[in-house]
Image (cartoon, helix red, strand yellow):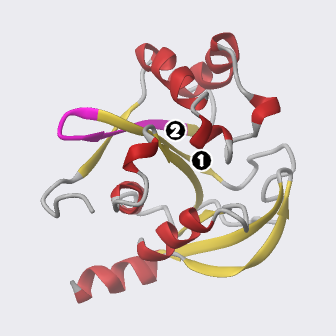
Amino acid sequence: MTNSTDSVTLRLMTEHDLAMLYEWLNRSHIVEWWGGEEARPTLADVQEQYLPSVLAQESVTPYIAMLNGEPIGYAQSYVALGSGDGWWEEETDPGVRGIDQSLANASQLGKGLGTKLVRALVELLFNDPEVTKIQTDPSPSNLRAIRCYEKAGFERQGTVTTPDGPAVYMVQTRQAFERTRSDA
């Protein structure tokens, strides 16, 4: 476990972070769940895929997760409605956000940092009064991610089919978030 006083913060990703993100996305514990071996990106791939987000030219917002001033991971949020490429085609609520994230170092897995990262991202997103719900879609075999989301307040809604294959559809509503905050 991490020290309970250690808090994860998020900052917007910048163009200067792309080389670091490239290196992270090629680490085996990330490759396993972020596209697989055949999808290992080159630096040019990372620049092409993530630079438009950094420059705010699309609806994905990229973040770097920080712990005690050091970068520890990547997170992104996006508007689910109209996200394209076969994702969330039946979504009608403009307030729904999707999230994805990963910790950079395998040595930090299983210590509570992922949960802290997800909680920080959820809190940041719900600071926007327009956000009604946050959803995510881990692989059914990614038990560590599923447990992380559950500890961060997400509830399983069932299995869905995504462009990446079957996924566990998990949701945290604004009401559930506010209820847990008032219970604290």
Q: Position of residue 148 (x, y in %)?
A: 48, 67
Q: What's the residue at 85%, 43% (across, down)?
A: 85
**Mark 2 closeness class: few <14, some 14–19, many ≥20 residues within 10 Å:** many
Name the residue beneath numbered marker 2: 61
Q: What's the residue at 24%, 58% (across, down)?
A: 2
Q: Position of residue 136 (x, y in %)?
A: 62, 62
Q: Quadrant of the C terminus?
A: bottom left
Q: Secondary structure at mark 1?
A: strand
Q: What's the residue at 17%, 59% (across, down)?
A: 3
Q: Secondary structure at mark 2?
A: strand
Q: Seen from this angle, which residue lies furthest left?
A: 5
The kind of residue tagged 1 is Tyr
N-terminal label among 2 and 1: 2
Instruction: Answer whether residue 66 is magenta in the image.
Output: yes
Q: Position of residue 16 (x, y in %)?
A: 41, 13
Viewer can see residue 64? yes
Label disc, if present, on residue 162 of the rendered structure: none
11 above or below 23?
Answer: below
Label disc, if present, on residue 78 of the rendered structure: 1
31 above or below 165?
Answer: above
Dominant secondary structure (helix, strand or loop) of the stretch shown in magenta:
strand
146 above or below 3?
Answer: below
Q: Is residue 70 left or right of residue 80?
A: left
Q: Is residue 59 left or right of residue 183?
A: right
Viewer can see residue 153? no
How far apart are the two marked residues, 2 and 1, measured between alpha carbons? 6 Å
Residue stretch in magenta: 61-70
**The quarter of the displayed image where residue 40 is located:** top right
The kind of residue tagged 2 is Thr
Q: Are marks 2 and 1 in contact (CB under 8 Å)?
A: yes
**Mark 1 closeness class: few <14, some 14–19, many ≥20 residues within 10 Å:** many
Depth check, front residue: 25 or 177: 25
